[in-house]
Amino acid sequence: MVDGVFAFAMTLLVVNVTLPEGFAPETSAELANALLGLKDTFLSYVITFVVLGGFWIWRVKGDELSTASGALVWAVLVHLFFVTLMPFSMVVIAQYSFAPAIWIYSGNMIFLALTAAGIALVVARDSDRQLLPSDIAGYALLAATAILSIMIAAFSPDYAMLAYLLNLASPLFTGRRSSK
């Protein structure tokens, strides 16, 4: 239950990272400049997330995660940071059909994939088992589709999000099949 409170608070922090109401950029450059203008707000978000994360780590080290390695706890926290950025990146992509919106969303997806793969690596190391390519294939596919989305955005931002549909093929790469 306490973990849920931390997660909720950390996710709510990103709600304050917003572009001005009524902002209607005419070009990619205007959107990019407005996003760069959020750097102070974003820095405050990062600092507050790290402080809350530190409190969470301190609390869980005596609780249910006391058997988890420090590397795993930190890997999960870094991954959760990018999870909490999803609402912001989704709102930006939904409101603005410019390449910088794709960069924000796709960059977030790339970091989600990398941190999830990092967690898989740490779990494999901590459990003294070999990491199989199928353990991270889905994350590699997500990162690849995010990169493809960025490339498509250079030519046609309106179609860039379609690259993510390739993730529907993930079971083919991971060896996992949906259960009925």
Image: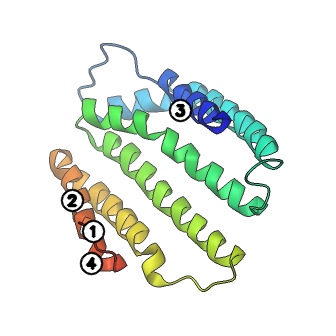
Residue under the point 73% across and 54% down: 65
Quarter holding residue 59: top right
Circles 2 and 1, Cβ within 8 Å, touching? The answer is: no
Q: Name the mark on residue 165.
A: 2
Element type at marker 3? helix
The colour scheme used here is: rainbow
In space, the residues marked 2 and 4 are separated at their CA atoms by: 14 Å
Task: Choose the circle earlier in sequence order: 2 or 1.
Answer: 2
Q: Which image quadrant: the N terminus?
A: top right
Residue named by callout 1:
178
Mark 2 and mark 4 in contact? Answer it, CB < 8 Å. no
The residue where tag 3 is placed is: 11
Q: Residue at x 44, y 58 (%)?
A: 110
- The first of marks 3 and 4 along the sequence is 3
Which residue appears at 28% of the width and 56% of the height? 149
Identify which amino acid the numbered label 4 is placed on: Leu
Which residue is at the far top? 22
Q: Looking at numbered disc 2 in the image, what kind of residue is underneath it?
A: Leu
Regarding residue 71, the answer to whether it shows in the image is yes
Looking at the image, residue 35 lies above or below residue 125? above
- Pointer 3 or 2: first along the chain: 3
Binning the other alpha carbons within 10 Å of mark 4 as few (below 14), some (14 to 19) or many (20 upward) gives few
